[in-house]
Amino acid sequence: MKGKAFWIGGVVVLLLAVTISIGYATQRGVFEGAWYTVDLDGSNEWLWITNYYGAYEVILYDDMCSGCSGIHGEGPSCLGLGSARISEPNTLRMDGGQLYCYWEEGVEILEWFSWEGSETVYDPTTDTLSDSYVVWGRSNDKKEEKIIDPITMPKPTECEPPDLESAISTGLGDFDLSAIEVPIQTYDILGATYELTFTSLTYGNQGFELLDNDDYQLNFWLEDINITYNITCTGVLCYPVTTAWINIDRMDYQGDFILGTTSECIYHLDNYSGDTALTGVEGSTDDLLFNTVLALFIDQVAGSMEEDIRIILDEFFISTIEGAG
């Protein structure tokens, strides 16, 4: 083991350049030795595992650590130091550890990183290791040692996320569903064909909340929704019905999304998905007998309208969020 001192911010920090022999004696366990893989972000990773009478020391080196920067494909090198034990045959379970990010401004412990409970599994048929993300192959078979040399970069500026709440609140001030266009709905009932043509939509209250738990969740709702249709009938046995009303107590909409960012603090919208749910759906017409018939189709009528509204809400919130970024 060699020691090399370097100066960061007026403080001498001792970087331990770890040297590990990788000769594979027959008495060694299957996990011991040096391993290599390419990470999901394209960086190179080395792993060294040493067994001290059943207590395993684990050392990880990543030459470009996206976890440090939070930006995919960018980051300084990082060093992970941890301990592990055999939890079951061919399974190494981490007891804990820390990850160190090598910024030009100094070495920083990555606070959110946790190795505890993660497992690495050995496959004797391929002599490889696998974890939740990658497969490791043996490394340095012909090289006596590997010296860990930090690759630093300036620590990125903390990006200030856009004010999504204000942008959504402002956008909803001009939001209007009354001009929604809905396809004609057709139903065949006892030899007669009824066409429901949408004529109007009104609602009482609307509101929203925005939750940020690493990812974003947007909850939006409409209350006291009233939808009106004109009804025309062709056929011999037509009910004397001309108008239908659909009343919905509440419609809830949930949008889930992620905001990505670049090193220049330019935000972009990732992985948006929206879903809806209706509460308290009732229908009626200007013909009492036809109310019974409409009850058979009310879920289809309301479901079709729900899908049309969801598409509009998806488009509205996506454009609003993208505009705010």
Image (cartoon, rainbow, N blue to C red):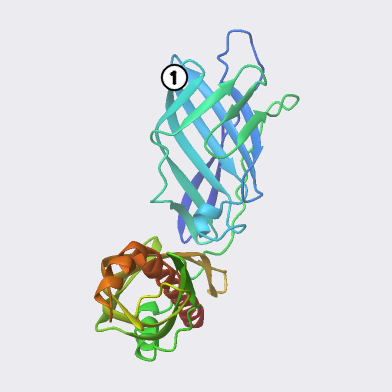
The type of residue carrying mark 1 is Ile
Residue 265 percent across, percent down from the top left: 53, 74
Q: Which residue is at the front of the view, 266 or 50?
A: 266
Residue 17 percent across, percent down from the top left: 58, 38
Is residue 314 among what the camera can see? no
Instruction: Pick out the residue farthest to the right.
Output: 142
Give the image quarter of residue 256. bottom left
From this view, report whether residue 32 is shown above or below residue 106.
above
| 61 on left or right of 248 | right
Q: Which residue is at the front of the view, 91 or 8?
A: 91
Q: Which residue is at the front of the view, 307 or 252?
A: 307
Residue at the spot x=58%, y=55% of the render? 76
| 176 on left or right of 235 | left
| 282 on left or right of 156 | left
In this figure, which residue is indicated by the disc labeled 1? 86
Residue at the spot x=33%, y=66% of the render? 293
From this view, report whether residue 14 is shown above or below residue 198.
above
Q: Which residue is at the front of the view, 251 or 264?
A: 251
Is residue 312 among what the camera can see? yes
Instruction: Pick out the residue farthest to the front.
Output: 236
The number of numbered badges drawn on the structure is 1
Residue at the spot x=71%, y=28% of the render? 140
* Residue at disc 1, secondary structure: strand
From this view, report whether residue 53 is shown above or below residue 12.
above
Instruction: Pick out the residue farthest to the top.
Output: 27
Label 1 neighbour load within 10 Å: few <14, some 14-19, many 20+: some
Residue 319 percent across, percent down from the top left: 50, 80
Residue 308 percent across, percent down from the top left: 46, 74
In the rendered image, the quadrant that contains the N terminus is top right
From this view, report whether residue 58 is shown above or below residue 41.
above
| 315 on left or right of 213 | right
